[in-house]
Image: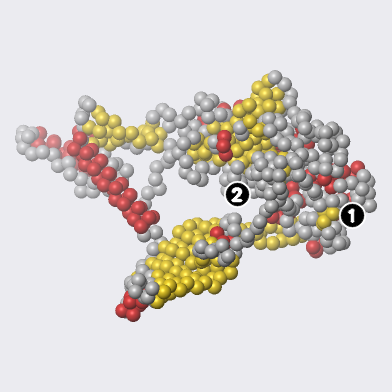
Amino acid sequence: MEQNRFANYTFPTLARLVLVFCCVYFTGDLFAQDPDTTLHFPITNPYDPTQNTPQSFDLGDPSSVKQTIVFDPITGTYVFRETIGNNGMNFRNPSMMTLEEYLEYERQKSMKENWKEKIDEQTEEDRALEFPIKIPGKTFESFFGSDQITIRPQGSVELSFGVNSSRYDNPILPVKQRRVTRFDFQQQIQLNLQGQIGTKLKLNTSYNTQAAFDFDNITKLGYSGDEDQIMQRIELGQVSMPSQSSLIPGSQTLFGAYTKLRFGRLTVEGILASSKGKRQEINITGKAQVQPFELTADNYEANRHYFLNLYFHEHYNEAMSQLPIAASEVNITRMEVWLTNRINNTENTRNILAFSDLGEVKPENIEGGPIPNAGQEIPDNESNNLYDWLVGQPNVRNFNGAVPTLSGTVASPGPFQQAIHYEKVENARKLAESEYSYNALLGFISLNQPLNNDEVLAVAYEYTYRGQTYQVGEFSTDGITGSDALYVKLLKPTLTNPTITIWDLMMKNVYSIGAYQVDKEGFRLDVLYNNPETSVPVPFFPYDGLDDEQIVTLVEMDRLNVNNQQFSDGVFDFVPIVYNGPRAETAGTINTRNGRIYFSTVEPFGATLATHMQEEGIPDMIIDQIAYTELYDSTKTAAQQIPGKNR
């Protein structure tokens, strides 16, 4: 122990100690006095828990540093160690404490954590953005009941700014009008404001930009008087007028003013408001309800339905061409779906690394540089050399060192760009089977809730093809434990970019009519085109060579007759999808459970229409006016800015 202590001293001090010992030896008085081992300028270790040294600036330790406290029975001390790497190399020199020092260290540590929790609770819950204001004067206090004004806002505000510049090479448009540049501003506000002036006047405001109805956004100012006052209550904003009479029914969706006055035993209530609600009566005939719906072509369900692989995107039209039978030899048997954990769930979470090129076969579908394997035609972990390369990278599997390794890769595959070639998600949440459904034959997934722009969606699935079993991605049951990352297939990155390859994984041919338990009897679906000359919707295109066939037939949603034979009859093909739990076991055009229409082609109003018109010999100028290709190669917002095609 003496040798270790001397090793930390500076050279001049060590030399002085040697001279002292020498002098004592020659005088013959070896035990006359103890050596002076006190440093005038002691050297302290700011990271040593045994030395209570304040820190003015600390960047923190790397995430790979492991801290351990081990009791040494020989010396009776507690040894603090900090190691790095798998070989247990010391990150800093170990330090030690006696039993008394260790108990004092734990006591101080517990006190700091306790005080921190108390401060956080006080800040976040009791005093979160609360501004009490004192108003001096008896007049204010007598009228409002107190001299204090309190305002407590709660909620969140998300603002997105951007610039969108699009160019449309349409010969009909002037050259100066072919480029459209505009600001892209989006907001998502969820605000709850509670204000109180004294004890009698209260202000309640609730505003949500995603509210389903206008009356869900509540603004209410209320004054409550004392029991012996004439003015009992005054309300401004969202008010209600309960009524026991059937002649004048009450309403909960009123906006205006309400007052309640009391004169002894006489109570007077008055209201002046306008109703924001709507009362509608529906006549039921034969135990069925008939309700009309109307949708526009640009109102597809975005960020909700995704192909599992570009292979399924390219073979979707072929698989749906022989309805009611799916022309597919694929049968998905197992699936795990991973999503960004925004609800801070602690169950069924794992670190994942999602790659866009995982399982892709064709070279044009691979962006990150992996090389396709010869002879491979369907999705699999062995479709290209990406998965084999990832298995041999321990730093990537370790999750913490994934970003520098992937971004620094120069050989194939690589280099990788985050949000384009891969996504790194910590504690991703595995969705329950009740949160999604998937089609086992066509290879796509449908979520119950749409995704936000910054959320990541990834999957791992297993399927059979011609008697063989294939797998894309890794399952949580594949033996990869701890904090090591799972390699999965990326379906949706955090970046919304139509120029990247996996943009085509999002399905843009699914529409929701907002109905449930849809019955085939009495159901009718028409596809209408707004005639630019008359502004009247018609079920055909008012152009020579196209006016003899209905649009529902041109978009290939009319291939069958009433007997499910391959003959067009001008009526929408009502082919329901059959589900077994979350798994769809058939192909179809409608989900009767939730009223979603699945078009039989990937781009019904784009490439499908253009192909049919080319076969009919329609001039390219007319095709460019009708085919809504921007709906599929641009964002939904950008496509909606083209009124000439949005008909």
**Left or right: 142, with 3 as reference point:** right
Q: Which amino acid does label 2 sit on?
A: Asn
The three-letter code of the residue at mark 1 reads Pro
Residue at left 40%, top 48%? 59
- Count numbered badges in the picture: 2
How far from the left and from the top, in percent, is residue 64? Answer: 43, 37
Q: Residue 542 carries which label?
A: 1
Does any portion of residue 602 appear in the rendered image?
no
Query: Would residue 281 be visible to someone looking at this image?
Result: yes
Residue 68 placement, left or right of 513: left
Q: Residue at x 72, y 36 (%)?
A: 576
Q: Do the residues labelled 2 and 1 touch (CB within 8 Å)?
A: no
Residue at 21% of width from left, 29% of height from top?
75
Task: Check the picture and name the quadrant holding the C terminus.
Answer: bottom right
Q: From mark 2 to mark 1, how far is it between C-alphas?
A: 39 Å
Q: How crowded is mark 1: few (under 14 residues within 10 Å), some or many (20 or more)?
A: some
x, y percentage for residue 453?
Answer: 60, 49
Q: Which of 471 and 11 is in front in this view?
A: 471
Closer to the camera, 117 or 127? Answer: 127
Which is nearer the eye, 44 or 278? 278
Q: In which quarter of the image is residue 217?
A: bottom right
Q: What element carries label 2?
A: loop
Label 2: how many Cα within 10 Å (few below 14, some 14–19, many 20+): few
Task: Name the outermost residue toward the top.
Answer: 467
Q: Which mark sits nearer the N-terminus, 2 or 1?
A: 2
Residue matched to label 2: 453
Q: In which quarter of the image is residue 287?
A: top right
Residue, x 32% and y 43% (percent of image)?
Answer: 47
Where residue 101 appears, as percent x and y from the top left, is: 21, 39
